[in-house]
Structure formats: structure tokens, C-alpha cells
């Protein structure tokens, strides 16, 4: 397949790009600028464009026609979205509108309705306190990030109804881990933050309350496999929704303990007053396992943390640059 990956310079997007290339697809990686692009697998075409600029999309050849699209370009920070809702809706909804418009031109030229896989989020469910959240649960996002993702989901459902795309929406939970050449550089997320403390780049990990709130994690390599399975399953005129997660609840304390095992270094922590948050947010991913044959063999917390530590170190991601003090790490 000729596959376009947006957000290819991001953590998940880079892994998806290389995984699709390894599977023999002709991959075009779209980044905002060439300076932000990682080193991709041989044969990957790299184009630069801003989703908010239709002229840049045309210049990058997004309207040439593709067999498949993995749309991962997005703003993703929940707390930040509360301070900048317009920016989040612009990036996550308007950017998707512009992408679909360019793809529609390609479909008119080639007659091919692309398989469109959208990277959504469990944030569309809102602040639920449940184990086994199914796709059928009515969405109720509690922040602009989740609301912008849900708005894009609904747009995709309507666009699929025209027959111009076949849409698959992947609602991921916490994607973590690493593969060779790609690791998570965002120290605002739990596992990179814990690794930053273990490696000496930060002084302490701040835990809200007792650290027993349960979340689930999926290995980025398993997440990339979900994108491939979704591309193969998309059917023009249809829109399907799948949760993607391990289904296993892991506490913050479990994460810190796993980082200690992988690094051989304790993760220094302090406990802060508790904040309102769900005690458990664990999805039901049986549907994608049953219908698409997807699995998550690498998604144990020990495998995720071990790979994040190992490949991050190999890429220079857990070295010891000047220490950052008084930087809040909120879990």
C-alpha cells in the first residue's frame, strides 16, 4: 500500500512509519519541518507540511492519492488543552478537516478511497472510574483535548458515510516503551519522568496521594501493530472504533518499582496531597483482539519499562545532562 503517516516525527508516529516500511509498504512520512524528522527506515519518503496550511499540504503532495493514511499528528497534553482550547481544536479538528479535504482531491484523481486510521484517545470517555471501559460507552470528555478528539471522530464517521474513505478509530490508553531508534522524549509522561529520575536528570518523582490509582499501558510496538491491522481492515463507507490497550491495571508505584528493576537504581519519590482523579481507568480491548486479530505480547509493564530504559540509553535519552531542579512531575 501507499501509506501516508502524519505526525511521523512523534514518538508513536515514528514507530508506525518504520513498522509499515518493514512490512513492505511504500510510506510517506509527514512532519511539520524537516529538522524535526527522525532517521526513518530506508525508502521512507519524508515531506514537510503544516496541517493548518492547505497550500503546504498540496505542495507536499498529500492530494496525490494514497491507499492508506495513519493520522497521528495532534496536540496531546490534557492540562495544556485547558489553557488553550482554541489551539487544540485548531490542531486536532481543523487539521483533520484540511487533511481529509486534500485526500478527497486525491480520491477524485485516482478513484481510490483510502483506508484512514485515526489515532484517538481514551480521553474521549471522560473522567470515568471503571475497569473494562467498552467502546459502546457514551463519550463524555472532560477537557478540550478529549473533546477535540471526539469532534474529529465524529467528522470521520460522517466522511466515511460518503464512501470516500474507510475509517478506523483507535482509542489508545497509555502508549509507552520504545523500539530501536524511537523512544519517548516527553518527560511530562509517567514512565519517561520516572526514568529521568532514575538516570539522574531529575531529582524526584512526585506522586499524587498513595500512588495506587490504576492505569493501563500498551507497548508502542504493539500499538504500531494495531495501526497495521486497522489499515488492512478498513472498508470504504464504514467507520469502526476500537480500544487499544493491555487490559492490565498498573499503579504508579508499580511503574516506579519496574523502573527501579530495569535501571538497577531506586526512583526517589515524594508523596503529595491527593488530587481528584479516577481510581482506575482500564479499557476493554477484546473487540480489536477478536475482530482484527491484534495482540499485545510486549505490553507487560516490565517489558515496556525495560525497553524504554534500554533503547532510550542507546539513543542518548537517559544520559545525565545538567540536572533539572524544581520541575514538577505530576502523575
Image (cartoon, rainbow, N blue to C red):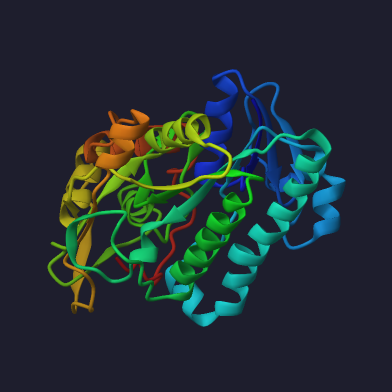
Q: Position of residue 307 (x, y in %)?
A: 35, 33
Q: Is residue 56 left or right of residue 41?
A: right
Residue 23 higher or lower than 159, as above or below: above
Q: Nearer the viewer, residue 72 or 254?
A: 72
Front position in the image: 47 or 252: 47
Identify which residue is drawn at 33% across, 65% down. Answer: 125
| Residue at image point 64% right, 70% down | 90
Residue at position x 64%, y 25% in the image:
1
Residue at image x 44%, y 38%?
A: 312
Quadrant containing the C terminus in the rendered view: bottom left
**Residue 313 visible in the current orientation:** no
Q: Is 285 situated left or right of 61 in this image?
A: left
Residue 37 found in image quarter: top right
- The quadrant in which residue 229 appears is top left
**Occupied quadrant, residue 281:** bottom left
From this view, report whether residue 91 is shown above or below residue 318. Answer: below
Viewer-nearest residue: 276 or 102? 102
Task: State left or right for residue 260 relative to residue 294.
Answer: left
- What percent of the width, then of the height, locates residue 64? 81, 38
87 relative to 63, above or below: below
Amino acid at each position: 500500500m501507499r501509506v501516508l503517516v502524519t505526525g511521523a516525527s512523534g514518538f508513536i508516529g515514528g514507530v508506525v512509519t518504520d513498522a509499515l516500511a518493514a512490512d513492505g509498504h511504500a510510506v510517506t512520512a509527514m512532519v511539520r519541518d524537516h529538522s524535526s524528522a527522525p532517521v526513518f527506515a530506508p525508502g521512507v519518503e519524508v515531506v514537510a507540511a503544516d496541517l493548518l496550511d492547505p497550500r503546504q499540504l498540496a505542495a507536499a503532495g498529500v492530494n496525490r492519492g494514497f491507499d492508506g493514511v495513519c493520522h497521528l499528528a495532534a496536540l496531546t497534553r490534557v492540562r495544556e488543552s485547558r489553557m488553550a482550547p482554541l489551539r487544540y481544536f485548531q490542531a486536532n479538528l481543523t487539521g483533520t478537516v484540511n487533511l481529509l479535504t486534500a485526500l478527497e482531491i486525491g480520491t477524485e484523481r485516482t478513484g481510490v478511497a483510502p483506508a484512514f486510521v485515526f489515532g484517538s484517545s481514551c480521553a474521549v470517555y471522560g473522567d470515568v472510574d471503571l475497569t473494562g471501559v467498552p467502546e459502546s460507552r457514551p463519550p463524555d470528555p472532560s477537557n478540550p483535548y478529549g473533546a477535540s478528539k471526539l469532534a474529529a471522530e465524529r467528522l470521520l464517521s460522517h466522511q466515511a458515510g460518503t464512501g470516500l474513505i474507510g475509517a478506523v478509530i483507535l482509542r489508545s490508553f497509555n502508549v509507552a516503551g520504545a523500539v530501536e531508534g524511537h523512544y519517548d522524549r516527553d518527560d511530562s509522561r509517567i514512565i519517561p519522568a520516572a526514568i529521568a529520575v532514575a538516570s539522574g536528570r531529575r531529582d524526584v518523582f512526585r506522586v499524587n496521594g498513595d500512588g495506587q490509582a490504576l492505569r493501563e499501558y500498551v507497548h508502542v510496538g504493539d500499538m504500531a501493530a494495531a495501526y497495521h491491522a486497522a489499515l488492512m481492515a478498513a472498508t470504504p463507507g464504514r467507520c469502526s472504533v476500537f480500544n487499544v490497550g493491555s487490559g492490565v491495571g498498573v499503579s504508579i508505584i508499580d511503574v516506579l518499582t519496574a523502573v527501579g528493576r530495569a535501571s538497577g537504581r531506586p526512583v526517589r519519590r515524594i508523596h503529595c496531597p491527593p488530587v481528584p482523579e479516577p481510581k482506575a481507568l482500564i479499557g476493554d480491548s477484546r473487540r480489536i483482539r477478536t475482530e482484527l486479530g491484534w495482540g499485545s505480547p510486549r505490553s507487560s509493564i516490565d517489558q515496556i519499562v525495560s525497553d524504554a530504559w534500554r533503547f532510550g540509553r542507546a539513543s542518548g535519552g537517559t544520559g545525565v545532562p545538567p540536572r533539572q531542579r524544581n520541575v514538577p512531575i505530576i502523575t
